[in-house]
Amino acid sequence: MNHDDAQVVEIEKFVPRNPLVILGFVESTTLGLLTSSYLIEQAKLHQIAQIRSIHIPPVTVFVGGKMRTPFRIYMNQEGSLMVITCEVPIDDEGLYEISSALVRWLQGINPKEIVVIDGIPVKGLVDNRTVYGAAETSNFKKLADVGVESAGSAIISGIGGALINESIGKKIEAVSLMTETSVDIPDPGAVLAIVEVLNKAYNLKLATDLLEESVKKLNEQTNDIISKFNQIQKDKSQKQTEQSIYG
């Protein structure tokens, strides 16, 4: 499917069965990306589609011995769980096109709900962690029942916010789950807090006994990818500056 400058490309046949759709990206923290990566690993999801856009940096991600495009869609064998993730930042100018194309595609698979994961950046260790939720009042009860506190007022930015914005009025239930996340050190506790809420609210039954070790490994991979991407952008910017100076 095409929508202006964005395209969802299906690479494998699949049968969706009213799936729960969980989305995690690189935003102000890496919590969304780490959580989505952990879900993909633990639920043994397989890639079914990818998103192409001129607003997604043209890079290839090499992780776990596999070459991958950065913006990917995964699903379980049962067709009941979908995870959407991307390792690189999305150009702000492309947020509308990408989110619009993705939500139009999601409408075709009749999702049960979309859940956007995001972190609240903090310094140092987090002693008392709370999971906050942003959702319509009618859709918040199941989250409140498992200890999620209302975010009160919040602005959800980036690709996650754009996706929720696009879902409004399209009969797709959407919520955002957020918790404090350290930007100084690996924070498996933040991932654990979100996974526990997902397990309780959506009956996912994801194992958490090896979470700390797994998240630390995923955190190293994520930081390495982000560092290399930032260096590429820096080198590109420096080259453009030199060209403008020396003609």
Image: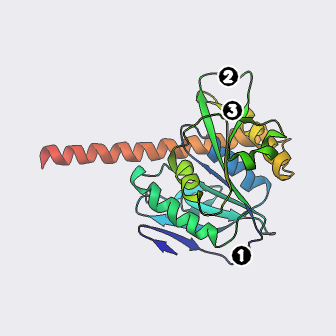
Q: Earlier in the sequence, mark 2 or mark 1?
A: 1
**Which amino acid type is marked by label 1?**
Phe
Residue 127 in the image: state x and y as whole percent. Answer: 73, 21
Cα separation, mark 2 vs mark 1, equals 42 Å
Residue occupying the point 78% across, 43% down:
143
Q: Nearer the viewer, residue 247 or 16?
A: 16
Label drawn at residue 74: none
Residue positioned 22% across, 43% down in the render: 241
* Residue lying at the far bottom of the rendered structure: 13
State left or right for residue 145 relative to residue 101: right
Q: Along the horizontal axis of the image, is 5 left or right of 149?
A: left
Nearest to the observer: residue 97 or residue 91: 97
Q: Secondary structure at mark 1?
A: loop
Residue, disc 2: 125
Identified by mark 3, the residue type is Asp
Question: Callout 3: 10 Å neighbours few (<14), some, many (20+)?
Answer: many
Which image quadrant is residue 49 in? bottom right
User: Percent x, y for residue 161?
Assistant: 55, 48
Q: Which residue is mark 3?
A: 187
Q: Position of residue 177 (x, y in %)?
A: 68, 42
Q: Which element type, helix, strand or loop, lies under badge 3? A: loop
Q: CA distance from mark 3 to mark 1?
A: 34 Å
Residue at the disc numbered 1 = 14
Residue 184 image-quadrant placement = top right
Tell me the kind of residue under disc 2.
Leu
Between tags 3 and 1, which lies in front?
A: 1
